[in-house]
Amino acid sequence: MNRTVRDERALRAAIRNGQLSRREVLKHAAALGLSAPVIASLLAACGGDEETTPTSDTAGAATATGDTGRATASPTTDTGSEASSGGRGRGQGDLLRMLFWQAPTILNTHLATGDKDNMPARLVTEPLLNINPDGSLGPVLAAEVPSLENGGVAPDGMSVTYKLKQGVVWSDGEPFTARDVRFTWEWVANPDNNSPNQAVYQVIRDVEIVDDYTVTLHFYEPTPGWFNPFVGGFKGGILPEHIMKDYVGERAREAPFNLAPIGTGPYKVVEFRPGDVVLFEINEHFREPDKPYFQRIEWKGGGDPTSAGRAVLQTGEADFAWNLQVDKQVLESLERGGLGSILVTPWASAEQIMVNFADPTVEVNGARSEPSTTHPFFSDPRVRQALALACDRQTISEVLYGETGTPTANVLNAPPQFVSPNTSFRYDLEEAGRLLDEAGWVKNGAYREKDGRRLTVVFSTTVNPVRQREQEILKASWEQLGIQTELKAVESSVFFSTDAGNPDTYSHFYCDLLMYTNGPTSPYPLDYMATFKSDDPDNDLAQKANNWSGRNFHRWVNEEFNQLYQQATTELDPNRQAELFIAMNDLVVNEVVRIPLVHRSGADAVSSRLKGIQPSTFEPTGYDIENWYFEE
């Protein structure tokens, strides 16, 4: 059992025994780095005899303070923030300067493949519902959240009806209607458009337009994850039919919208230089007249996490810096700058090593790592198991991440009911060596060989000081084991690019191993587990024929996993749902499709005068940008 799960269970036991107050629970949970949904469930177990919402010293952003004194995102939703009490006046602030060391390259959320693109796109493109910090749903373009009580969710799980807000217009002045919702489903679910989100929308049989402001989603089967399509900033954005209707199939990636989106959100794009910067200004058609506060936003990409943090915390050249993935000593020194603080946000994501099941050295029709090939040595599970045993998670977590990361054995680390108690990890070079010996890989000098072939891996990740140190820690152990390791570092704007012609993107996977952070973007993480399914190989498996849009870039095929996944798409019983997701996680972990390293929390640098931020575990940074403001 991993430490996070063990500590959480101990905390729950203390709650059951009445040993802790709500405030004490909040403090302990924040110190453990538990996710917002976990914290919410812990608070719910305490009962309601004490005030839930902690006092915050930053208006508009409820925070809990852990033992380190850092601000940690709270699970509360009604905190007296601008979300509930109104804005600070449209355009009363001038420029908000934001730094992201991963630069955006596309602004169509349904063609994006990473946070770097989804985050700026969310300032423009909106979903029907948000996922709140406590894991509940909140209306955005929908007038209300569908439920069994209000008749929006059918008891049999076969349909859900949305009532839409009226009077909403796109940033070009055209009205937003039910037709746009239906069109979004048609566009994303269309395999010809090669959207990475197509699996999320293909569970829908039809989107019925009841009237201009009412739609009913009809599913093929009972669908417990009815809130995966159209919900959240990562996969829920609504597309404007009048702009995108002519851009389908081969023309999908030619749409001007991809670089200059038209949306209903608080901002519109005035300039975008892919791989560099996005400049936003207020969408004068935004439906809330007293929001947003900032006239303009500069969304600057590139650079590195350390310089981004320094610009906020020490020099004051920027107001916000995202995801300071720097080692803990650097983070501590940045905090001493005095111009801001580190906001630690519970994430559902983990730093992971991805294993390639195809052969990156063999070319098929001008492409490598094609699903028709088989990896020359990762096809042997003993080699994959040996690699996992030679990963020193504890050192990586303690030396590099500190309080912003915990070692994990799971690919699925949230929500809590789906976190497996069955997995474990250990660092054991002796056992790893025994497995390689058994597999016939014999040491010949420093490295292992078999049938005249040396055991060599190419290990790629993004350019980032922490990740390069992770690579070095892992390489030292792997080479001690006899695995020759070639390290590769790729600029994040390239690594996470959707450019089908770029061989260094993670979806091409033209190497043996990849490392980066990812995780679920929904409380019902079916979209995340779709990364591993293969029952529709032409669309599921990343390959040249689908422009590498298939989400299963491992090219791993496993019928047992496919069956579990299909059962989870229709299972309505919560207990059985948990069993299915845990079984899927365990299969991925035990088959060593991925090697989870560290369950991470986000660490953002925030200027002392920037207020109103309410980060959510399942939403991209900036999903609540209309509520941010300066306190002068």
Image (cartoon, rainbow, N blue to C red):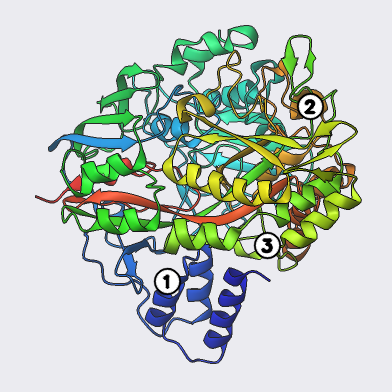
> Which residue has dot 2 on it?
359
- From the viewer's perspective, tell me whether residue 518 is left or right of residue 411: left
Q: Nearer the viewer, residue 588 or 113?
A: 588
> Which residue has dot 3 on it?
427
Task: Identify the amino acid type marked 3.
Answer: Tyr
Q: Residue at 18% of width from left, 37% of height from top?
A: 90
Task: Identify the amino acid type marked 2.
Answer: Asp
Quarter-of-image position of residue 3: bottom right
Q: CA distance from mark 2 to mark 1?
A: 43 Å
Q: Residue at 37% of width from left, 35% of height from top?
A: 101
Q: Nearer the viewer, residue 360 or 531?
A: 360
> Which residue has dot 1 on it?
31
* Mark found first going from the N terminus, 2 or 1: 1
* Mark found first going from the N terminus, 1 or 3: 1
Q: CA distance from mark 2 to mark 3?
A: 27 Å
x%, y% of residue 539? 75, 25
Q: Nearer the viewer, residue 360 or 429?
A: 429
x%, y% of residue 139? 45, 46
Q: Nearer the viewer, residue 216 or 188?
A: 188
For the residues bearing labels 1 and 3, Cβ distance under 8 angstroms: no
Q: CA distance from mark 1 to mark 3?
A: 26 Å
